Amino acid sequence: MENANRLGYQEYLGLLIVSTSTVMFFDTPRQFFLLGANAAWLSVVAAVVTATVIYGIAGLALEQYPGQSFADIAVQVLGRALGSAAVLFISLYFAFVAAFTLRILSESIVTTALTNLPISVIAVVTLLFAAYAGHRGWNAIAKSCWVSLPFLALAAFIPLVLTVETWMPDILFPLLGHGAMRTLLSGAQAAGVMSDIVLAIILAGGLQKPVSPLKAGVIALALSGFLLISVVLAVSMVFPYPVAAQVTLPYYSLSRTLTIGRFLQRLEALTLLLWAFATVLKVAISAMGCVTAYAQVFGIRDRKPIILPTLSIVFALSMLPGSFFDTGHILWLWVRVCGGAVSLILPALVAVVALVRRKAAQAKGGPS
Amino acid sequence: MTSHRIMAAAVLALALCTSGCGRISEVDETAFVFTITLDPGEQNRLQVGIRIPVPRLVGKIQGQAAGATTDPQSLYLTTSAQAPTIMDSIALMQTYLSRRISLEHTRSIVVAETLARADIEPLMRTLMREPQLRSTSLLFVSKGTAFRILTENRPVLEINASKYAELITYWQDVTGMIRSTQIGEFYNMMISNAMDGVIPLVAINEKVLLARKQQEREKAGGPVAPDPARAEDIQAKQEKPAPNEDAVPKRTPGSFLPGHLPRDGGNVLEFMGVAVFRKGKMVGELSGNETLALNLLTGRFKLARVTVHEPGNPNKLATTVIYPGRPTRLAVELTDGKPVLHARIVVDADIDSLESSSEMQSAVHVAELERLVAQQLHRWAESAITKTQAWQADVFGFGQKARRHFATWDEWEKFDWASHYKEAELKLEVKVNLRRTGLITGRVTTR
């Protein structure tokens, strides 16, 4: 069963792209407008580059340990207690990402489409899907992600291509937003927004063939970064800066402006289906990321018994915020920026310490 | 196998959940608002009017294709309510309307001029926040009471009043004298610190309305009374000899404001010119001609007609069809912190009509006609820009070009474009290229 459930390279890549790119659908673009004003796209570039550099360091170092799970490496390097704590933190991070993505998905659907539906109904249906996906295992989730990639690309590019006529490139000026340093630094500090790429490290031990998590991770970050930058740029050219920072769901608002001639309007109904589907996958991925990291710490071979308890915790966490506003605030500041940054830095830290120790041991003539 | 059956059943069950009825409301229990009007209230802060089609009647009339014989007003439910906010008014209406009011299909929103002059920013924020309303809905400013636009509107050619308003705005592509504005577009301009917004003007032609009411009274069996306006005309015609053609003032169609077009018959509504806003406050109006210039300067221009005196024959008139030649180029130069506005308009033109049979193949005549059309356009554009400079309302987007001179947002904000726009120097260039002369080129001399 374990062997059959191992991932191929393409599925692995598809999984990472879906996991890191769904942030563009909710209020992440708006948060970047708050950071970088009309130069929000520059902040996104800074965030993506920073995340790629940190992930690159972790990926480069961990390539020296093929076939080993991250938990094993962390325990070897930091000791049982600290190593387990590091992986548990990442597990917890994924639980929070799953919970708050679930909540923001439910709130967004209630705000935009099904106004009379209780959020708990949307949350439960999404978690039922996640439970089934978890039951089928990573391979099924990853294949679904691979199949859904063209739809994700459609979801991203329909609003971009069809709003070209309304783009006002002049409003990208002044080019530096709040100033080059402030814009880039604030963007770099928000690198945690791409930290779901840590999943590449968590899953690295479960690949069918020995493939480089570094290469797949960097490609996923580049593609997701490109999508996020494209969306933020399009929003920047359609909504003048103060408006872009006020819009609750910039991607949705962008798709509401779509019209093709006189007759084809209301295309947001189409894009809504696409982003809702991608986000449902994202919730399943994050929840399973939490389960996998947890199982690695405690050496649990059969993950199925812990799927339902994990999803129950995710559901409970998702219901904690009082409002859409609170959800967005917590998801951005505490989960993405703070939690994400720590989750991104931890593997890099573990990998660098592991490498330094190995070099030191080699210098002493010990085992490499 | 069992698990596959369970999955199939689950998928079918989910499919049931996703089909229609998203808001738990049946279509035949919903009242779809087509038009909203906003007026200052007398008993409360705001008077909100709505127009809802009566589906069974609209469908029936459309099926019979006999709209002309039916009063279009009878196909709609028109009502208004006064409350502190728009949504409060809608809630108030819900206490006496049997169907659930839905704003999802609202196509037009008409704001009264008095309200527009006060400040419509709070209203725009409400409209933009409401998920039911679309940012693509059309905005209008009415001269006089907005609710009267609903009650007096009888579009003869259309059954659907919403389609009427929509179609009228499409013809900005043919006349250039009106302009359509969507809520989202206006909101963006209102919040922006580099550009201001405009909203098309609509008004009731009281003379046409009076004549229509008289006709209705006569049809209803009332005594025939002389129409005051028509009586004056008849008297004037009887007293004075037929006017000398040259003595009749030659006013271009776009020089009028809505409500005052020289015409008889047809629907009472007139769409002409735009209301100019500085942020959320209406500060002035542009005539049809100035609106044409606005469309030219903002790249929204498609086609228009310009009439000038014939070259070499000032008693006769020449009408040209103009259309975009090159994209309009706007630029702002900052000299010692003072802006200089550069605008270059290039249009192509065809001769539409010449009253005399003078030779237009002559290069001198062609150049002169090009110069006259360019002069006309220059005058309208200059007038529009000068007016908006006085109002500190940059509706042309010069500010969008000015922001290129700044590196950071804070520097740009500190510059305060509106105050600099007021004192900016204008360098305007209009070039017209006459391309075609129509099917008749000129006089053929036979000896």
Image: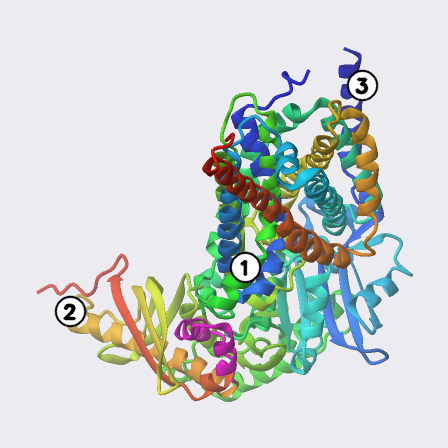
Query: To which residue does mark 2 refer?
Result: B362
Residue A117 visible in the shown view: no
Q: In the displayed orientation, state which residue is furthest to the top.
A: B1
Q: Closer to the camera: disc 1 or disc 3?
A: 1
Main secondary structure of the magenta stretch: helix
- Is label 1 in a helix, a strand or a loop? helix
Q: Is residue B168 left or right of residue A99?
A: left
Spot occupied by residue B28 in the image (x, y as percentages of width and height): 83, 44
In the image, is residue A177 above or below residue A81? below
Q: Residue at x 80, y 18 (%)?
A: B6
Between the residue at mark 2 and the residue at mark 1, the CA separation in whole angstroms equals 65 Å
Q: Closer to the camera: disc 2 or disc 1?
A: 1
In the image, is residue A4 above or below residue B69? above
Magenta span: B392-417
Task: Using the rendered image, report if marks 3 and 2 lie on a common chain.
Answer: yes
Name the quadrant containing residue A37: bottom right
What amino acid is at disc 2?
Ser
